Image (cartoon, rainbow, N blue to C red):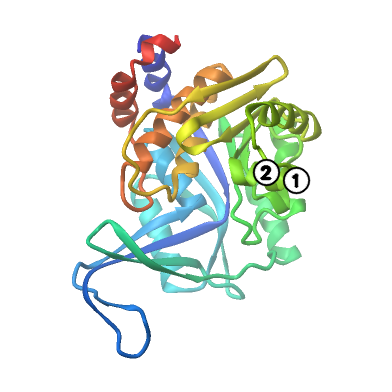
């Protein structure tokens, strides 16, 4: 616990630049007692209110702030109410939002989830533009990254395949980070993964890793051999594959290890990947070795899935879960 606590104590010194697909997560809470006469669907009375939270790369930013780090963000919003509200939300927590670009040709990505009884998600409605941003916006993104990156300790590339981290933007960002000696982490979608070659660390969930490698992880040996191969092919220093209830697997040149998940009751896995990459990135910037950073990310992800909806996690919640799991054994 002392080792873990020492790493977490340094989080308030860490400066993070997040680049990626900004989203808004809208939650509508209600109750239901009948089926619609028009179709075999539930009728939801939206009597529990509406909650609007940062999502996607904005959730990564939110997690950095919750973990006491200092965050700046580069991304794109539409010229609309939801985009401006998102910027205001992030700014109110001290985030540097001056790198956000308003593109009138796009809408701000919004995911609306309808819940009943605060536990059961009935439906999700997505509103988004999936096409890559224009060449002019790409150049502006790269310019904004160049302006911000010198002031950060770690660069996080948060890809949701909504068009911001196209191959040009991601490769330019990674090149800048490497040239300046900055830690660079990424959680790309499989379809875009080749654009993230050379990042310091790449994190994928198991289904993403299977899609990216065209392999099925039907046994531990398959995960280990494929993880090692992906590490080489992607030219990264560390590969992390999150595996749900199993935990997460960590690969470096001299390491292939699985960090066991903490047995907990899972309420909602949405946004857990954002929490994991945030905690791992800040741990690396705080001087942690990859395996220790992965352990902290594992506890952070466990704390996230105990909550309903996309939520940030605090250092205190990580410590509480680590204490419950007996983290001292991992030191």
Quarter holding the C terminus?
A: top left
Q: Residue at x 44, y 28 (%)?
A: 261
Q: Residue at x 68, y 57 (%)?
A: 140
**Towards the viewer: 152 or 186:** 186
x and y, in percent, of residue 179 in the image = 75, 30
**Position of residue 237 in the picture relative to residue 47 (left or right):** right
Residue position for label 2: 210
Residue at the outermost right position: 233
Residue at the outermost front position: 218
Q: Residues within 10 Å of mark 2 (few under 14, many from 20)?
A: some
x and y, in percent, of residue 255 in the image = 66, 16
Q: In the figure, 214 relative to 33: above or below? A: above
Tell me, yes or no, whether the two marked residues, 2 and 1, touch with CB atoms within 8 Å.
yes
Residue position for label 1: 214
Q: Residue at x 52, y 48 (%)?
A: 73
Q: Residue at x 40, y 52 (%)?
A: 90
x and y, in percent, of residue 223 in the image = 66, 31
**Towards the viewer: 225 or 277:** 225
Checking the image for residue 166, the label placed there is none
Q: Secondary structure at mark 2?
A: helix
């Amino acid at each position: 616990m002392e080792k873990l606590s020492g790493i977490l104590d340094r989080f308030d010194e860490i400066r993070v630049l997040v680049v990626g697909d900004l989203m808004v997560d809208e939650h509508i809470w209600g109750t239901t007692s009948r089926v619609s006469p028009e179709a075999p669907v539930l009728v939801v009375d939206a009597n529990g209110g509406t909650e609007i939270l940062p999502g996607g790369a904005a959730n990564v930013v939110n997690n950095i702030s919750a973990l006491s780090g200092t965050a700046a963000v580069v991304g794109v919003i539409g010229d609309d109410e939801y985009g401006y509200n998102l910027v205001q939300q992030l700014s109110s927590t001290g985030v540097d939002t001056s790198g956000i670009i308003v593109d009138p040709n796009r809408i701000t990505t919004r995911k609306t989830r309808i819940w009943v009884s605060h536990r059961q998600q009935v439906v999700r409605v997505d509103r988004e533009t999936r096409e890559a941003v224009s060449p002019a916006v790409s150049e502006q993104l790269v310019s904004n990254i160049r302006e911000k990156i010198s002031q950060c300790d770690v660069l996080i590339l948060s890809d949701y395949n909504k068009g911001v981290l196209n191959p040009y933007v991601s490769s330019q960002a990674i090149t800048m980070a490497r040239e300046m000696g900055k830690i660079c982490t990424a959680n790309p979608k499989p379809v875009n993964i080749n654009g993230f070659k050379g990042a310091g660390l790449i994190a994928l969930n198991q289904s993403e890793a299977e899609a990216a490698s065209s392999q099925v992880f039907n046994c531990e040996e398959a995960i280990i051999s494929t993880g090692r191969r992906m590490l080489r092919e992607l030219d990264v220093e560390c590969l992390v594959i999150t595996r749900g209830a199993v935990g997460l697997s960590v690969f470096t040149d001299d390491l292939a290890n699985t960090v066991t998940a903490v047995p907990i009751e899972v309420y909602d896995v949405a946004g857990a990947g954002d929490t994991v990459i945030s905690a791992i990135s800040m741990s690396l910037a705080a001087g942690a070795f990859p395996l220790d950073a992965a352990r902290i990310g594992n506890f952070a992800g466990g704390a996230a899935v105990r909550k309903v909806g996309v939520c940030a996690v605090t250092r205190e919640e990580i410590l509480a879960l680590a204490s419950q799991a007996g983290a001292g054994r991992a030191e």
